[in-house]
Image (tube, coloured by chain):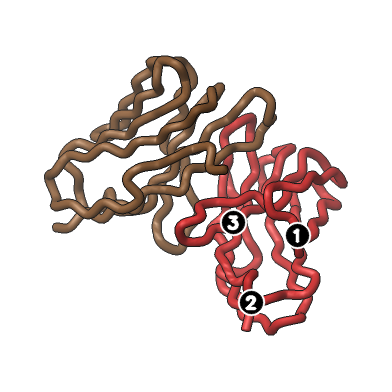
Amino acid sequence: DVKVTQSSRYLVKRTGEKVFLECVQDMDHENMFWYRQDPGLGLRLIYFSYDVKMKEKGDIPEGYSVSREKKERFSLILESASTNQTSMYLCASSWYETQYFGPGTRLLVL
Amino acid sequence: TQLLEQSPQFLSIQEGENLTVYCNSSSVFSSLQWYRQEPGEGPVLLVTVVTGGEVKKLKRLTFQFGDARKDSSLHITAAQPGDTGLYLCAGARVTSGSRLTFGEGTQLTVNP
């Protein structure tokens, strides 16, 4: 069965902290994605990766970076967390056009 | 610019009623997917439609892809409280690889 896991379901951080969100998939998928989801704005793509060590900016990459050292793991980094980064973060991996999502991390930045 | 417009944004109905959710665009998509997301969880794929005019049924849910592959609809017959959730449409384009464009979602509440 397809599985995408995210390191935390809930996270509370302070402004200025460096935040790491981790995502692991067990399906040997090439492509992985990070989105944020906000009411009224839908899912917005932050970064995606189509291979190990490869990454591309999505629609809203500012304030974020990513790392993909191994095929199964895709990390999202908030270099210096700000209150406007409070959101639900969703990771996904894909087989062709079908995306499989993790359960999400709800991040609160105080 | 929102490439996929979903309507309505919110829908609250009684158990047993029928409903339709629409997903519209001025762009052509190679395929269109529908996901359902429950509170505190990630979206889960319901169906993928790839051919213009295609109709797919999943129990009480009927999905249709427009002839021109620019729009889609989701119709639920005799809605049940278990259908409550956020419904998202997502389109794929040949030029975008595996990237999807998501609609804003329709929050459906089915009251018992």
Distance Cα–Cα, label 2 vs label 1: 14 Å
Q: Which chain is red?
A: A
Dividing the picture into quadrants, the one containing residue B22 is top left
Distance Cα–Cα, label 2 vs label 3: 18 Å
Residue at 82% over, 50% down: A70
Amino acid type of the residue tagged 2 in the rendering: Thr
* Helix, strand or loop status at disc 3: strand
Residue in the foreground of this view, choosing between B106 and A95? B106
Dot 1, crowdedness within 10 Å: few (<14), some or many (≥20)?
few
* Helix, strand or loop status at disc 1: loop
Dot 2, crowdedness within 10 Å: few (<14), some or many (≥20)?
some
Dividing the picture into quadrants, the one containing residue B63 is top left
* Helix, strand or loop status at disc 2: helix
> Mark 1 — residue?
A62
Q: Earlier in the sequence, mark 3 or mark 1?
A: 1
Residue at 31% over, 39% down: B21
Quadrant position of the C terminus of chain A in the picture? bottom right
> Mark 2 — residue?
A83
Instruction: Using the image, name the chain to which the residue with label 2 belongs.
Output: A
Q: Nearest to the eye among marks 3 and 1: give it.
A: 1
Amino acid type of the residue tagged 1 in the rendering: Glu
Which numbered marker is on residue A90? 3
Q: Percent from the top left, x then y, of residue B3?
A: 53, 37
Amino acid type of the residue tagged 3 in the rendering: Leu
Residue at 31% over, 26% down: B57
Q: Earlier in the sequence, mark 2 or mark 3?
A: 2
Left or right: residue B14 versus residue A26 is left
Which numbered marker is on residue B14? none
